[in-house]
Image (spheres, rainbow, N blue to C red):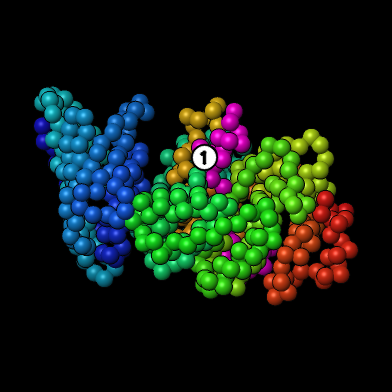
Amino acid sequence: MLHTLDERITVKRKLADCFAYLRDFSTIEQWDPSVFSAHKLTAGPIAIGCQYQLELKMPGGQQIAMRYTQLAIKEQKLLVLEGRGANFTALDTLHFKAITADTTEIHYRAELNFQGLSSPAYSLLKPILNRIGKNAARGLKQALEIPDTPKQRLKDRISDHLLLPAALNFGRRGYLRQARKSHANRLDGKVIAITGPTAGLGLSAASELSRLGATLILIGRDNSRLIQSAKQIMDFSGCRKNQLSRYETDFSDLNDTANIGRQISAEHPCIDVLINNAGALFNEREVSNEGFERSIAVNFLAPILLTKVLSPSLHKDSRVINVVSGGLYTQGLALDDMQFCKPPYNGSKAYARAKRALLTMSEHTETAAIVHNMHPGWAATPGLAKSLPAFNKALSPLLRDSRMGADTMVWLASAPELANYRQTKLWFDRHVHTDAVLPGTRSTKSDIEKLRQWSNDALFKYLKPKEHGQFPTQESADFQFLSRVKGVN
């Protein structure tokens, strides 16, 4: 039984942008509501013969698999793909036509052939298929058109303060309910530095940013894993090898972090986006060779230090994205015990406190760039499985995958609607959210000043004079550091 879906949409977007977005058919998961996930199976650049694996949504939460093959590519004119499922096939054709310099018509046609489908069954299925086609066309139009700058929604403020509704959206449920999931804004010529790109959220974000055309600076603590992740990124996006550079550093070693930052700044005088994604949760209290509790070093001091050292390469339109955690909602600043010296040590609390400190200091980072904070929700990553195995196992069916968790990170790096948004806020699922709800978690002006002073004293010795900004004098730092480094007096 043959059924044809035939839809035309007109979008306010240049032809080249529309074609570039749809050229990789795996982006269908971002705009077709009937597709749960899509993956490019063929490594490297998009070409005829490229294959994709799709998981289609079915009633009752079930999914069915479908394999697509790229049959034809005519630059900025035509894409043709053939899909095969268990008992049906599809021939998808997309025609592109420039209406004006900034407007494009896309003609989407899908010929669906169902084997063994009776006429009565087809009669019942036909309106459902037509609705799927119209929803896909509507989703594609929304995916390609640039929206207005988002504002904090009343329902989010209410949900945040009620706690439970907000927490329920931390899992995949929240991502799947998003109205917009597309990443259609090209980043050709943009330079993006990202820490922790070897697995989980960082690897997913780096892969998507590379697919958008960005040149990536990959910063991690294991060169062999950086090499492996670079290959995975090239397989995913089809980028050239010279669009990726690698830098090895241990973020618990602040001297090493500062030095690698200076090397990056010297070799990359213009950085458009810095994503401070690297983080670690330590179940046991550990102290670095420099005397810092490792959680506060890796999750707070290192990203603040790296941002300062890279400031010469960051311009007024650059974006700094600090990846924090939903766990910070449970913790305020522990200004009397910044290094968690008071027993018993709790790794989750230490992590959340460090992320709270990072969020708090984000508004006071001395850089010309725009600074954003985001939290990814609850995502199934190798780091989560290692540090919180019981949590990971218990909530496994509800967790986001890395792609879902990295979505807002990629959006903050690429969205043109944020070009003039210069407020430092906490973002989750592409919307601003309240960052302090529970009593004792909101920072006062006095708290912020004490935190700024503590971090300034802690980082003073790792910065050169021109990098200090409004840091205290050396004499002040020398006398105050030992008394402050364990807490704030």
Among the 4 quarters of the image, the one containing residue 450? bottom right
Residue at (74, 40) in percent of width and height: 285
Residue at (23, 42) in percent of width and height: 68
* Residue 71 relative to residue 146: left or right: left
Residue holding disc 1: 381
- Residue 69 in sight from this viewpoint: yes
- 177 is within the stretch colored magenta: no
The quarter of the image holding the N terminus is top left
**Tag 1 secondary structure:** loop
Specify the amino acid type for callout 1: Thr
Q: Where is 268 relative to 345, above or below?
A: below
Residue 374: x and y, percent? Answer: 56, 51
- Residue 169 in sight from this viewpoint: no
User: Magenta part of the protein: which range?
Assistant: 362-390
Task: Report crowding for label 1: few under 14, some 14 to 19, many 20 or more residues within 10 A (C-alpha).
Answer: some
Q: Could you say which is closer to the camera, residue 81 or residue 178?
A: 81
* Residue 45 relative to residue 146: left or right: left
Q: Could you say which is closer to the camera, residue 246 or residue 385?
A: 246
Residue 237: x and y, percent? Answer: 36, 54
Residue at (61, 65) in percent of width and height: 261
Residue 226: x and y, percent? Answer: 50, 53
Residue at (41, 46) in percent of width and height: 179
Q: Could you say which is closer to the camera, residue 373 or residue 42?
A: 42
Total marks shown come to 1
Q: Where is 373 relative to 122, above or below?
A: below
Among the 4 quarters of the image, the one containing residue 378? top right
* Residue 247 relative to residue 90: left or right: right
